[in-house]
Amino acid sequence: MKILITGITGFVGSHLVDFLLKEVPNCEIYGLCRWRSPLDNIKHVLDKVHLIHGDLTDYISIEKMIRDVRPDYVFHLASQSLVPYSFTAPIATLDTNCQGTCNLLEAVKNTRSDNFDPIIAAITSSEVYGQVKEEEIPINENCPFRPASPYAVSKVCQDMLAYQYYVSWGIKTIRARMFSHTSPRRADVFVASNFAKQIALIEKNKQSPIIKVGNLDSVRTFADARDTVKAYWMLVNQCDIGEVYNIGGVETMTIGKMLNMLISLSNFSGEYIIQTDPARLRPSDVTLQIPDCTKFISKTGWKPEIPFIQTLEDLLNYWREKV
C-alpha cells in the first residue's frame, strides 16, 4: 500500500506519519516536501518515509510525483494555513491553496488508469463557514459558506474543486472540514501553541510575565491532532466517495478559558499580565465555531480520546523542551 501525504513536514502531517507507521502495517509512506521545508517534525522518522521534492504551485513536479509514486491514498494536507497571513498575502494564499489543489487533482486525472485510481482525502477547514448565526449552532455540513478571510476563501475553493473533480471526472475525493485542533509540533503562530510558548519562556525567565493575546472571547471547539489523524484514516476507509464530513472535538470554550487552562498548568510562581496586542486582532474575525459531527461519527464511530487538558499539557511540555 502506497500512501502520499502533501504537507508531510507539517504538524498534522507528522502525526499522520506516526499513526500510519504504528497502525497500518506494510505501508510505504511518501511525502511532498519543498526543498526549504524544515524537517524538525519528522526527523525521528526520516529513515521510514520517502520525501519527494516539489511544489504544489508547480504542475510539472506534481504530475511527476503522481506518476512516479502511483499512491493508493492521498492525504492532501499542504496549504498556506495561517489566517492572519492570508490578509497580508492573499494572492500567495490563493495560489498555494487553490491552484495547488487544482494541480494535484489535475495530475491525478491525467495519470489515472484502470489500475491506478487513488482515494484522495481533501482536508479543508471549518473556516469555510465563517461567522455563523447562533441558530445555526452546532454547525452541520449544510451550513452556508460565509468565508471571512482570504484563507477561508481558499478553503472554499479547495472544497469545491475536490467536489467538482468528483462530479465531472469521477476522481475519488472525500472532503473533511476540520475544526480547531492542536498538539505538540504546532507552529507558534497558532493561538494555543503561541500561548504555550509564551508561558514556557516566562517560566525560564526569558520573557517578562506578560502574555500577549488577541480576541479572547472567540469560541472554539478543540481536538487533539493525534485524534484527528485517526479520523483521517477512517475517512478514507469508511466514508463515502464524493461526500463531505465535519470533523471536530467535543470540548468547547472561549480562547480566554483555554488560556486559563494553560496558565493552571504553569509552574511560574508570579502573576501573569494579560495584554491585548492590536497586531493579533484580525480585520474580520470568526468568533463562534461549534461543530456537528454526527454525519462522520455515525459513519465511522470515531470519537476523540485525548482530553484537551492533556493536549495542553503535552503542548506546554513541548515548548518547555524547545525553549
Image: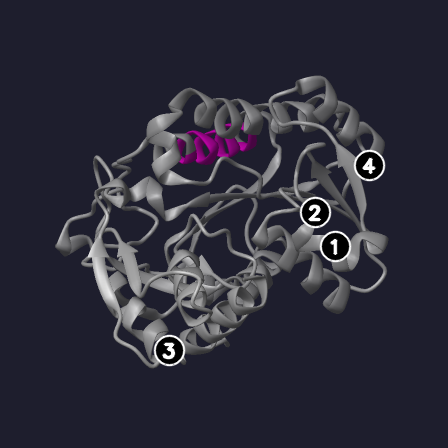
Residue at point 33% right, 60% down?
Answer: 292
Name the foreground residue: 160 vs 183: 183
For badge 2, the amino acid type reads Leu
Residue 69 badge? 4
Which mark is nearer the camera, 3 or 1? 3
For badge 1, the amino acid type reads Lys
Residue 301: image x %, image y %? Answer: 51, 71
Cα separation, mark 4 vs mark 2, equals 21 Å
Residue at point 74% right, 54% down?
Answer: 43
* Labels 3 & 1 near each other (Cβ < 8 A): no
* Labels 2 & 1 near each other (Cβ < 8 A): yes
Cα separation, mark 2 vs mark 1, equals 6 Å
Residue at point 54% right, 67% down?
Answer: 227
* Labels 2 & 3 near each other (Cβ < 8 A): no
46 within the magenta span: no
Residue 235: image x %, image y %? Answer: 57, 55
Q: Is residue 59 left or right of residue 235?
A: right
For badge 4, the amino acid type reads Val
To which residue does mark 2 refer?
39
Residue 275 figure quarter: bottom left
Q: Is residue 172 above or below residue 246?
A: above
To which residue does mark 1 refer?
43
Majority secondary structure in the magenta region:
helix
For badge 3, the amino acid type reads Phe
Q: Is residue 292 in view from this perspective?
A: yes
Q: Is residue 256 above or below residue 286?
A: below
Q: Which residues are magenta?
A: 155-166
* Labels 1 & 4 near each other (Cβ < 8 A): no
**Label 4 secondary element:** helix
